[in-house]
Image (cartoon, rainbow, N blue to C red):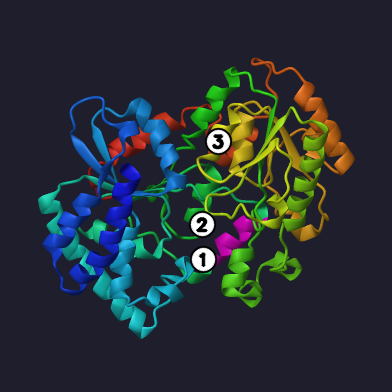
Amino acid sequence: MYKLRLKILSTFNKLLIPFFVKNEMFNLLSWLFILNLTKIKKILPAKKIKNKALVLYRTGGIDDLIQSQKKYNKNILYLACPREFFKHIFLTIFEKENLKFADFKYSNDNKMFKKIKKKKYKIFLSSFLQVLKLKFNFNILISFNFLYSAERELHTVCQELKIPFLVLFKESIHTEIQTKYFLYTYKKINEKFNGYKIAVYSKYAKKLLVESNIANKQKVEVIGCSRLNKSFSYKMINPKNQIIYYAIQNNRGLPTPLLKSFGKVFFKDIKDNKFSNSKYNWKELHLTTIKILKSFAILNPGITIIIKIKHGEKSNKKEYFNLPNNIKVISHGAGHTLLKDSKIVIGWNTTSILEGIAANRFILIPYFYKKKQFLKKAELKLGLKKSCYVNSKKDFIRKLDFFIKKDYKKNEISNNLASLDYHLGNADNNAGLRLDKFLKKNLKYKLH
């Protein structure tokens, strides 16, 4: 019923929002917006509602909010709003021109046509929010990335109307080479966050945003990764004889998207740029991992192997054809929930490995790629034992066999936890409490 409602609303939004926007029907647009709001039932307030928070819903970002607030929320009503609502307004005003917009280039792209449209969009949002607030009073707006084109002017308008716009920023786990390219890009294109506050996972994530002049240090707060709490809870659960492989993404940890977006010449002042190549990827590492897992599955039909691919990624790729019956490919749901029953966690440059460390699982990192200077800097710093890295098919099979047979001991720490603090700021498992404090103190607008 819930999914049907969302589908119907999505159809109405696509038809009605452009019409209401073109005719400046702010009242009707406000009622349609209110109709789109859905209570986030997992974090309903324990006591009487005192505050309302509008959440621009994103599957990947909502987990941190839920893990924190299902434990600590006392009086905030969280309402999910589909991000497509503002995207439809944006598309209508820009007359589909945003298809040429890149999130990274929004502030820097000031051609006369777009400059006029940005101003028009900002004025429209200001009028809309003022009408909306009269019909449905709310305290804060929450999003999960400060770069979304359709939300940039929303940041500014909320500041002008003294509505706290908070970003719970999760896209902050970077390799050494990524950090260099992001810092250089942010500085050169002069990107700015015009909202109220940003919550980040780690100290180095804050340093990146402050040094690149995205935001001043008063606007950025380190709180850690709340959803890691779920992974920590798995430590006391004996896993099954199951292996989880978080499928390696082609560009994970590489600056490839930036190189393709801006071109190699744009980064000429970066020392490492002369070694870069937009064709670098981890595809071969992924395909080799799949082949080895297939071989192991055939030899061990009683052991379940799960391949978790990213939401939206196609599961009908050639490498997923003709898999043994004990290998399953899963594309839906949060990846960290699969840790509960898994004894061995396999991945590369992914948060899921960090979650596996928190869950005290046995970690294996495919490490059979050509160790070029540039690629070495595209590895996520994890501080794991050498035994966690596999250098050949023979070594991989041997370690899979060893760890799947090894007894799991709840009170025996399998991995160094330093990477959890460095990347996720939550080695102490208190990020949920810090997020709660961050939300509470920012419910009302204050001048910095």
- Asked whether residue 76 appears in the rendered view, the answer is yes
Residue receiving disc 2 = 211
Secondary element type, mark 3: helix
Image disc number at residue 277: none
Q: Is residue 442 left or right of residue 291?
A: left
Q: Are marks 1 and 2 in contact (CB under 8 Å)?
A: yes
Q: Height in image: 281 above or below 67?
A: below
Q: Mark 3 against mark 2, which lies toward the viewer? A: 3
- Horizontal side of 425 relative to 374 (left or right) equals left
Location of residue 128 in the rendering, given as x and y in whole percent from the top left corner: 18, 62
- What's the residue at 29%, 37% (across, down)? 441
Residue 416 in picture, x, y percent from top left: 68, 29
Could you say which quadrant of the image residue 246 lies in?
top right
Amino acid type, mark 1 = Lys
Query: Which residue type does callout 3 highlight?
Result: His
- 185 falls in the magenta region: yes
Q: Which is more N-terminal, label 2 or label 3?
A: 2
* Mark 1, residue position: 187
Q: Secondary structure at mark 1?
A: helix
Image x and y of residue 76, in percent = 25, 35
Q: CA distance from mark 3 to mark 2?
A: 32 Å
336 and 430: which is toward the camera? 336
User: From the viewer's perspective, is residue 359 above or below residue 266?
Assistant: above
Label 3 vs label 1: CA separation? 34 Å
Crowding near the residue tagged with mark 1, few <14, some 14–19, many ≥20 C-alpha atoms within 10 Å: some
Q: Which residues are magenta?
A: 177-187
The amino acid pointed to by label 2 is Glu
